[in-house]
Image (tube, grey):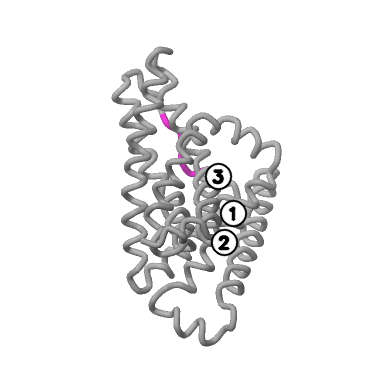
Amino acid sequence: MDFSAFSGPAFWAALLSIIVANILLSGDNAVVIALASRNLPAHQQKKAIFWGSAAAIILRVVLTVTAVQLLTLPYLKIIGAILLVYIGVQLLADSDDEGEMEGSSNIWGAIRTILVADLVMSLDNVLAVAAAAQKGPEETRLALLIIGLGLSIPLIIFGSTMLLKVMDRFPIIITLGAGLLGLLAGGMLVEDPAIKESMQAAFEDAHMIFEGIGVAIVILLGTYLKKKNASKEAK
């Protein structure tokens, strides 16, 4: 293995994208963890949060590695890019479709709730992290996933509450996160094996063009829907 690939700018840019995307998209997961364990005795809450988070993270690693392998098949990156744009728009539009979640008075019930909820809600994380890993050197992608998700774990567990407060105070962070998803979607679209050669032949700098288009679509459409939702609530 060429270890110089681990010190290049592409590796570090992809690693940073993985960490940022995973943290920005884990706010709802952190809320679920708190809700699921809120009825437990104080001495069991930390155990439920730790083991529930650990199980959910292991599952997410497996799902992400699988997603990276699947993204080598034709047309799946196109589908993934469309889903990323949708997720980015929803993030910016601030939609809340998770519904209410009841707390559990049993530690294993709380862990099960955390695991199931994280599985249902992790599509955004898996797609974003898989897309970010694709931006790194090919021989480092598995390492990027492991390192990126590993570095994200303590930040998510210990910093999620603070991050939610920061997002409420500085909404621009949500916009930047949504824009990052649009950028990753544009890059993923261009890299699909079914259209990669034709796209690169048609556009001199296809990556930059479609990454810019992805950012613009997510931010413009997400902002429009956010304003539309706000006007409906005001009526």
- Label 1 crowding class (10 Å Cα cut-off): few <14, some 14-19, many 20+? many
Is residue 1 in view from this perspective? yes
Which label sits on residue 113?
A: none
Q: Position of residue 127 (x, y in %)?
A: 43, 56
Q: Nearer the viewer, residue 196 or 164?
A: 196
Determine the CA span between mark 1 and mark 3.
Answer: 9 Å
**Which residue in the protein does label 2 denote?**
182
Q: Quadrant of residue 221?
A: bottom right
**Which residue in the protein does label 3 denote?**
24
**Quarter of the rendering occupied by the N terminus:** bottom left
Q: Considering only vertical position in the picture, is 21 above or below 217?
A: above
Tell me which segment is drawn in magenta: 96-101
Query: Is 99 colored magenta in this rendering?
Result: yes
- Label 2 crowding class (10 Å Cα cut-off): few <14, some 14-19, many 20+? many
Q: Position of residue 101 (x, y in %)?
A: 42, 31
Q: Position of residue 112 (x, y in %)?
A: 31, 31
